[in-house]
Amino acid sequence: MNRNPLDKELQHISGMNTASQALVQRMAAPGLAILFLALVAMWAGAAVGQTPTSIVVVIGAIVAGYMALNIGANDVANNMGPAVGARALTMPVALLIAAICEAAGALLAGSDVVETVASDLLVGFNIAPTSFVLVMISALLAAAMWVHLSTFIGAPVSTTHSIIGGVTGAGIAAAGLSAVSWPDIFIIAFGWMVSPIAGGAIAALLLFLTQVTITGRIDKLRAARTWVPVFVAVMVGTFTMYLVDKGLQHVWARGAVTIVTLGLIAAGVGWAIAFSRVRLRSLALENRKKHVATLFRLPLILAAGLLSFSHGANDVSNAIGPLAAVVSMLSRGTTDVSTDLPFWVLSIGAFGISVGLALFGPRLIRTVGEQITKLNEIRAFCAALSTGLTVLVASALGMPVSTTHIAIGAVFGIGFLREYRSRREMERKSVPIYARFVDPRALNATPEMAFANAREADHRRLIRRQSVYGIMGAWVVTLPSSALLGALVFFLVSRFAL
C-alpha cells in the first residue's frame, strides 16, 4: 500500500520536532548550570568590589561554583539514594528535600570543616601569594573536572578524595613534597579507610537490631509499637545535639550539659510523636514484614533529611575551602579562615550543591538506591541513619571524611548482612541432620551436586559484586588521578599567569 506523500512529510516533520524537543531537554540542565555560574560571577564581583585582585576572586568563585555543582550531582546521591530505592520518596520530592537540607547544613554548620581543607593541608608553603592562589584554584578545577567525568560515566566517587588530591598534587607541583602536611594527609586517609567500615558496621548493627526487636518477632506490630519510636528518638536526639553544637555556636555559647539536655528533651518529644503515630497507623496494618516496614517510611525520610543536612555541613568545604583560602590570602595575607568567613563564599557552596543536585543528581541517586542491593524502608532507614550518625561525628570533629565512602559502606553492610543471614538460612534448611556427622566434602560428591549447591549459593548473593568492585575501583583511582590532574592544571595555568 502506497503512502500519501503528505503523510510522509508530516511524519518527517513530527520526527524533527521530537528530536528538537529531546535536544532542548538535554541542553536545559547545562544551560541552567551556566546561568548559575554567571550569577556566581556577578555575586562575587559585587561582594569584593573594584580591587586589583577582584578578577582573581571572581575566577576562583566560578571554579568553586563549578565544583559545588559537581558535588550536588555526584555526592548527594548517597543521601537520597536509599530513600528513593526503597520507594519511600519519589524523585522530585527527594530532590526538593535534599536541596533544602543541603543548603541549610552548609549555611548553618559548614564553616567548621572549611578550615581543614583551606589551610591545614599545605604547611611548608613558603612561596609567593600568587602561587598559593594558583594552587588553590588549580586544585578546585582539577577536582571539579574529575568529579564531572565520574558523574558522566555514572561512578559515585568521593569529592573529598578529589579536592584533597587536587590540593596535594598542585601543592607538590608548586613547591615540592615539603609543601604538603603529610601527617594531616595520613590522618585523613586513615579516616577514609575507617569510615566505610564504620558506616557498614553501624548499618548492619541497626538492621540486626530491627530484626531482633521487630521483624523477627511473632507479633511484629506489637514489637513495632515499642521499638520504632525508640529508633526515631535516637535519630531526633542526635540531630538536635548536632544542630545546637554546630549550627548555633556563633550566636549562643552552650556547654556540654546543655547540649545533652536539649538532645534528651528532643528525643523524648520525638519518641512521643512517633509512639502516637505508629500506634495509630499500626491498627490498619497486617502482621506482615512488608506492612511493618511501612512504619519506617517517615523515619526514613527524616533520616534522609538529617543526612543531607550533615552532608551540606561537611562537604561544602570541598567546594569553598580553597576559595576561602584564596580570599583570605588576597585580603589579609594569610590562609587562616577560622574567623570571618564571608557569607557570600559559604553561599556559593550551599546553593551550588543544591542546584547541581536538582539538575544532574537523579542518575546517581538511582545507582546508589537500586543497583547495589535491594532496599526496603527498614534497610534504607538503617543505611541512612548509620551514614548520618557517622558523618555528623566526623563533621563535629572537623575532619573532612568521605560521605560517599560512609554511605556506600552502609549500603554494603546492609547487603552483606542480608546475604550472610540468607546463606545461613539456606544451610539450615538444605543440610539434613545426618550431614552433621559426614565429611562436608561428601555433600559435593558428584558434579551435579556441586553445580546445584554452587547455583543455590549464587542465588543467595544479595549484593551486586560488579557494583562493589566498580565503586571500590573508583575510590582507589580518585585520589591519585585528581592529584595528577591538579599538578597538570597548575603547570598549565602557571605558564599563563606567572
Image: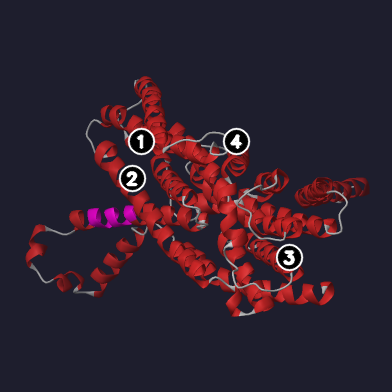
Of mark 1 and mark 4, the one earlier in the sequence is 4
For the residues labelled 2 and 1, the Cα–Cα distance comes to: 9 Å
Three-letter code for the amino acid on which mark 3 is drawn: Val
Given the image, on which type of amino acid does mark 2 rest? Leu
Q: Which residues are magenta?
A: 417-426
Residue behind mark 3: 133
Which callout, 4 or 2, points to the residue nearer the camera? 2
Q: Is residue 96 left or right of residue 329?
A: left
Residue linked to disc 2: 206
Label 4 sits on residue: 93
From the viewer's perspective, is 25 left or right of 116?
A: right
Cβ–Cβ under 8 Å for marks 4 and 2:
no
Marks 2 and 1: CB-CB under 8 Å? yes
Query: How would you rate the neighbour count of disc 4 (Cα within 10 Å): few for under 14, some for 14-19, many for 20 or more?
Result: few
**Circle 1 or circle 4, nearest the eye:** 1
487 vs 334, nearest the viewer: 334
Task: Check disc 1: other Cα within 10 Å, few if <14, some if 14-19, many if 20+.
Answer: many
